[in-house]
Image (cartoon, rainbow, N blue to C red):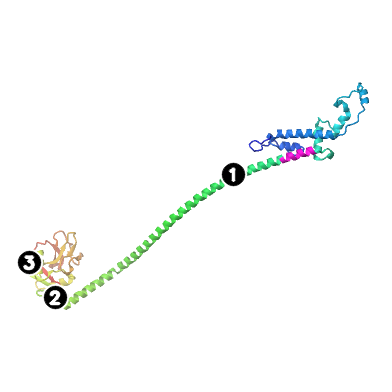
Amino acid sequence: MCQLDGGRAHHDPSPITHHSLDPEQYLFAMLPSELRWCAAVVLVVASVAAAQENLAARPRPVVDTQSVARKNGASGVVPPYGKRYGSSARNDVTRRYGGASPTTNGQTNGRTNGITGHNGHNVNDGHRMITRALWRIFDALMQKKDHSQLYGRMGFIEEALKKMISVDSQLEGEIDKLKDDMGICMTQLSTVMEELGRLKTLSSRLESLEQARPELRDQADQEQNAVWDSAAAAYSSCPSPFSRVGSECYYLSKGEMLGWEDARRECGRHGGDLASPRNLTVLRQFLSDVQDPPEYLWVGGSKQDDGAWKWTSGPQAGVPIDMSKSTWNEEVPSGYGKCMGLFGHRSYRAYNYDCKEKDFFVCQYSF
């Protein structure tokens, strides 16, 4: 049987057109090289069958055997087929194949004319069957080739589609991950925005407090003064030996000069402590009005371990002392001493002395 190589048809690459060949030759040329020998066998078998059919249908001519015998010089002898018919037989064959010898190009032209219908009386069923068979073989091969190409293209498209589906799945996974990350970021951003809002609120409150701080301080001072004034009103007279100076009670000791610590103890014996005035100007005025005022005297201020000067007794205990020149002498406190005293020749401005020096002192009574 005639089979294709691997189910694929291989065509002759030579350029052939149907205008230059008869239908049988054109179909034969268009067949794959693997099937041409099969087609050739079919053509030969069909041609032999057609020739036998024509010869069987052709009437035998009446031949004068005696005339032939006399012509050939042998009476009663029948010549072979080729000589039996002579020129008339050749002429008959020539007429059958279109006016040319069967062995010449006229044979091909005669068959072509018979196929194409130029001489319709020479067309036979055998040639028609061959032509139909060849066309059917050709159509089947073309369809098979088209199917093979189509299957190849479908396979390519299927692979491309699989790749696209894989990429699409991968992209969907990445998109889902990005959505999850975005959700986490949005949650964190919301938390940060809430914290930022709280910080802005606290900053606004702090700014408001800073702006209101001087006003609050003045208000606190006024309230404290009011308390002292009310206390002074309750105690219109200071206990002996204290004298009333404004809203406070002072006592100037001019008897025995003592050191700073001993002076504190002496003031305590009278129910008070070394003076720690809220208003140093009032105390200075009191000392200036005293007859024969002392040149030096102790008050209740001292230098702390951290170097800061603070009031250490009375209602002002722990309050920092003003370090401006309105409080101190022209020279700021040096490292000479850690106890605070007032110098009479400098309008009783503050000065630091050695705590062991013995001077007069001012006591203050606290209600």
Q: Residue 244 carries which label?
A: 2
319 relative position to 208: left or right: left
> Which x, y percent locates residue 56?
84, 34
Q: How far apart are marks 1 and 2 (CA)?
A: 117 Å
Q: How far apart are marks 3 and 1 (CA)?
A: 121 Å
Label 3 sits on residue: 257
> Is 115 inside the magenta-drawn segment?
no
x 16%, y 78%: residue: 234
Q: Is residue 294 visible?
A: no
Quarter of the figure with residue 241: bottom left
x 83%, y 35%: residue: 54
Label 1 sits on residue: 155
**Magenta part of the chain:** 125-136
Q: Do the residues labelled 3 and 2 touch (CB within 8 Å)?
A: no
The mark nearer the N terminus, 1 or 2, is: 1
Quarter of the figure with residue 64: top right
